[in-house]
Amino acid sequence: MLIEKIHKLAKELAPKVIANRQHLHMHPELSFEEVNTAAFVQAELGALGVDYTSDVAGHGVVAIIEGKNPGKKVVALRADMDALPILEANEVPYRSQNPGIMHACGHDAHTASLLGAAAILSKVKNDFEGSIKLIFQPAEERLPGGASLMIKAGVLENPKPASIIGQHVMPFLPVGKVGFRSGMYMASADEITMIVRGKGGHAAMPHMNIDTVMVTAQILVALQQVVSRYANPTIPSVLSFGKITANGAFNIIPNEVVVLGTFRTMNETWRKEAHARMKQIAEDLAKSMGASCDFQINVGYPFLVNHPEVTARARAAAEAYMGPENVVELDLWMAAEDFAYYSQVADACFYRLGTRNEARGIVSAVHTPTFDIDEAALETGCGLMAWLAVNELGAVD
């Protein structure tokens, strides 16, 4: 059976996949700078005899593995390649050699898994009908997102995939398990920059000033009404502020305060309405207190929705590959992912690969200096991707 053949190949290839992941982890590159990462991917594909196109939407790489009757149906698999501006704290042999840059979100594991899937699929291409498009995507971590740029470059055309599948590590899920969720899964994400301007001066003479710190405090409290009172309670919404810069002192009120934050939700109509309400509240409240407010929203990724039928097929295929006890239901997650762009224009499934191992102390969240994975997950990562793609090729829409 093909599923058994894929299992065997995944096990045989696991050491190579782990080695690839460690190489990528040691040589991380930031978004839009993935020159060497892309070259490594191209070299690995070339060694497999897989044709590819390079420099797609920057440093993206796209490959096609054709089975029998290659035009019958096309399914796409996607992995992201970029790293984060984080100084790694892990003391491991494969620690980042690029100071201040780290694969702290698992994109090294994603790329290595897709390369492993490519190796498996190239060995079993006579056992399936159709073609599998491999998308190695740059710049997931920075707006406007590599996915949007690759879509504009035509990655979902010529040939057009019937569906697209993406895999992401999950440090809260034990190694050996995977997770799926149908429908809405991840949030849209917008960046907020708010500048409150007033009249600074001596803190002992507030009547002579327009206190930007107090105005900012009032605005921040008032803005939470957008989530608590204006939002439909059935629509997930989060408004958070993570940085406030008020360059005053113990006895100095600053002329301006700069605030950075994020707004996340799962409804595009409400998203636009919320933007307008936030801007109006902030600007009107500042004006009422004698100050002014420049409220800017950098619109980010849309919300991610998993196609019900594609996700149901993928989940059933995962249960066949791993056993039902190792496939779990995911909760809604208010983090964002630029895979959402694919999900807005194609039938998509984005699932999670468990990488947690408490016994070994591998428990850190993504985007932290101590993030790591249990590399035993990579055997599942490459094999399951290959199996899901082949299974989806055989599905009747």
Image: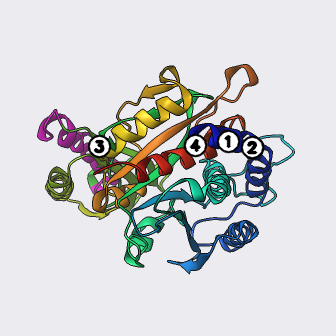
Magenta span has 308? no
Mark 3 neighbour class, 10 Å CA radius: few under 14, some 14 to 19, many 20 or more: some
Q: Residue beneath label 2, please? A: 14
Q: Residue beneath label 3, please? A: 309
Q: Kindly report the distance in space between the C-alpha atoms of the residues bearing marks 4 and 3.
A: 22 Å
Residue 247 at what x, y percent from top left?
A: 48, 57
The structure's colour scheme is: rainbow
Residue at 51% in and 63% down: 68
Residue 376 at what x, y percent from top left?
A: 71, 34
- From the image, state whether disc 2 or disc 4 is nearer to you: 4
Q: Residue beneath label 4, please? A: 2
Q: Kindly report the distance in space between the C-alpha atoms of the residues bearing marks 2 and 4.
A: 18 Å
Say whether marks 2 and 1 touch (CB < 8 Å): yes
For the record, the magenta segment spans 208-234
Q: Earlier in the sequence, mark 3 or mark 1?
A: 3
Please tell me which residue lies in front, 52 or 153: 52
Mark 2 lies on a secondary structure that is helix
Q: Which mark is residue 243?
A: none
Name the kind of residue labelled 2 in the image: Ala
